[in-house]
Amino acid sequence: MADLMLDLLLVAALVWTAVQSLTTPNLFRGVVLFIVFGLFMALSWVRLNAPDVALAEAAIGAGLTGALLLNGVGHLREKRRDVSI
Amino acid sequence: MKGLVRRSVITLCIALGSLLFWAILELPESRVHLAEQVTPKLAISGVTHPVTAVLLNFRGYDTMLEVAVLFVALVAMLAQRGTRNELHVTAEHRSSIPSHLQVLQWLARVVVPLMILVAGYLLWAGAHRAGGAFQASAVLAAAGVLLKLADMLPVRTTLGPASRSGLLGGLLLFFIVAAAVMPTAPQGSLLQYPHGWAGALILLIEAGLTLSLGLILARMFLLLADDIPSSDGEE
C-alpha cells in the first residue's frame, strides 16, 4: 500500500513538473523545474529496479543538461541587459 | 483563431498520448529473453553485475564504438569551433575573488574532492552493483563543470599534449586491449577476453574510460558554455 502511494505520488510529481517546466513563462523557473523533473525521473528509475539508468539520468539528464541550460539562461539574461543599456 | 489552434494542439497531444499509452499496453510479449541468456554466463564474465557484464564483456565492442562516437563528436565540435574564439580568454588571473564567487569557490573546494572519491567508488562498484565507467565519468565531468563555474579552472583555448592524451587515452587503451586479446580469442570474435583475465581487463578499461569520458564530457560542456560570445571582460 505504501509502495503504491509512493509510486502514485511520484507519477503525479513527474507529470506536474513536466507540465510546469514547459508552460511557465519564466525561463529560469522552467530550467529549475526541468532539473527537478530529472531528479524525480531518476527516482522513478530506481522504483522500476533500474539503478544504472537512474544514476545516468541523475548525472547526465539532471546534472549536466541542467547546468548547460542554466548557463544558456545566464547568457540570455546578459544579452538582454546589454540591449536594455 | 489562437484559441482554436491551441485547442486543436491540445486535442492532438492527448490523442497521441493515449495512442502511445495504448500501444505500450498492447505490446506483444518479447520473444528474446536476454536476462536468461546473461545470467548463466555471468560466472565467466569477470564481474557479478549483469549490466556491466553486458556492457564490457558480452557486448564490449558496442561500448567501444559508443566511446568512439563521443570522441568523434568532441573532435567535430572542436573543429567547428575553429579559431573563432581564440581571443576569448577566461579571467584566470584576477587579483581578488569577486564576491559572488566566494561561496561557490568554497563549495567547490569542499565538494570536488568528494566527487572524485565518489567517481572512484562508482567505478569500483560497477563490478558488482549499479555503477561503472559512464556514471563515474559523468560525476568527474560534473566536478570539472563546477570548477569552471567557480572560475577555478584555467581553460586554455588550445589543447596541450596532456589534455589530448587524456581525451584519447581511454579509447586508445580500449583499442590496445582489444588488439592484445585478439590472438587468444577464437576466430572471428572481437574482444573475447582470455579465461580468468576478464575481471582485471574490464577494470583497466573502465578506469581509462572513466578518465577520458570525464574529460570529454567536461570539455563538451566547456565548449558549449563558452561558445556564445559574451561580455566576460567587462565585469
Image (spheres, rainbow, N blue to C red):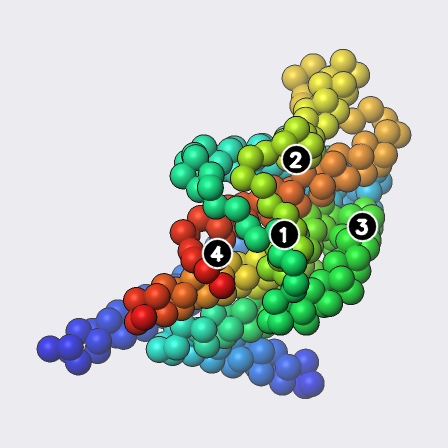
What residue is pinned by disc 2? Answer: B163
Residue drawn at (76%, 18%), measured in percent from left and top?
Answer: B180
The amino acid at mark 3 is: Gly
Checking the image for residue B93, the label placed there is: 1
Q: CA distance from mark 4 to mark 2?
A: 26 Å
What residue is pinned by disc 4? Answer: B233
The mark lying in front, picked from 3 and 1, is: 1
Q: Is residue B212 left or right of residue B6?
A: right
Question: CB of mark 1 within 8 Å of CB of mark 4?
Answer: no
Say if residue B173 shows up in the picture: yes
Q: Secondary structure at mark 2?
A: helix
Residue B212's spot in the image, x, y percent? 67, 38
Residue B117's spot in the image, x, y percent? 81, 55
Say if residue A48 shows up in the picture: no
Give the mark, 3 or 1, whose residue is nearer the N terminus.
1
Image quadrant occupied by the N terminus of chain B: bottom left
Q: Residues within 10 Å of mark 2 (few under 14, many from 20)?
A: some
Direction right: furthest residue: B196
